[in-house]
Image (spheres, grey):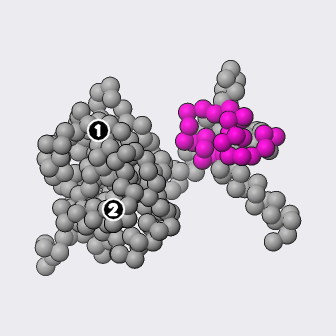
Amino acid sequence: MSIAEQGTSTAVERTLAILEVVAQRDGMTNSQISRKLGIPKSSASYILRTLERRGYVRRDRASGEYRIGLHVLSLSRGVLRGLDLREAAAPILRKLVERSHLTAHLAILDQEEMVYIDKVEAPGFIKMDTWVGRRMQVHSTGVGKALVAFAPEAERDRLIKEHGLRKQTPKTLTVRSRLLHELEKIRAQGYAVDDEENSVGVRCVAAPIFDVQGKTQASIGVTGTTQQVHKADLPRIAELVKEAARKISQQFDYRSPARRD
């Protein structure tokens, strides 16, 4: 690679890193971004000005903080339009929220992380700190564990080996053998639980969505505080989530082995 090519590659990587960190925070100054990413302040400033001019970030004139710009949505729209899954799941997600009174999410696996591709907020004052496009760890989330539990063994091992088991809370499963045991339990019961493993005080119940070939296409889950999701209610909530996942799977002509002709 030539010196010019190396410089271009570095600039692209810095630009993408800036977009990612701005998207994950509710406002950051040029100095904060520079320190966070280890990028010279002058370089970060140049990239931010370019992104602002193109509409990918916006700058608050009073605070000097940058936030993600609306033009990013024009890129995501093209991806989401191609996701028939999202369209098929939308009414089922809304019904799940009505029945559970919890926030519902639809997630897929992308580059060893789970990504929310749809969300229906539950009514009330308590709101979950999640959004469409947010990327999170697989091993510490209910929807993430539901995504990988039914994957081939080699793929599960690769995900664990390459991505690691980073500790999010005191309850995060960070030992490989414990996580594998948990995934075996999920396969047996048909649903996953995140019991304060990603965020303290938050529980999630999730189930996998299968395609016509029986491969995990996505996962669906409901999330609430530990006050909203009592442990005693987990079996009832799990049945609601599993039913919703089955209905979405059926949109892709999937039938469980027990129901195949």
> Residue at (27%, 65%) from the top-left corner?
181
**Image location of residue 15, percent across then percent down:** 70, 50
Mark 2 residue type: Leu
- Around disc 2, counting alpha carbons within 10 Å, would you say few (fewer than 14), some (14 to 19), or many (20 or more)? some
**Image location of residue 118, percent across then percent down:** 39, 48
Determine the secondary structure under disc 2: helix
Whether residue 143 appears in this view of the structure is yes
Q: In which quarter of the image is residue 10?
A: bottom right
Q: Gap between marks 2 and 1, in whole Å?
A: 22 Å
Stretch of the chain drawn in magenta? 18-42
Whether residue 183 appears in this view of the structure is no
Q: What predominant SS class does the magenta segment belong to?
A: helix
Q: In which quarter of the image is residue 55?
A: top right
Q: Mark 1 points at which residue?
A: 224
Q: Give the mark nearer the N terminus: 2 vs 1.
A: 2
> Residue at (44%, 42%) from the top-left corner?
131
Give the numbered dot on residue 85: none
Left or right for 11, reference 67: right
Q: In which quarter of the image is residue 59?
A: top right
Mark 1 residue type: Gly
**Image location of residue 246, percent across then percent down:** 21, 60
The residue nearer to you, when weighing 63 against 174, is: 174
Quadrant housing the C terminus:
bottom left
Quadrant housing the N terminus:
bottom right
Q: Depth-wise, is mark 2 or mark 1 nearer the camera?
A: 2
Left or right for 204, reference 19: left
Give the numbered dot on residue 179: 2
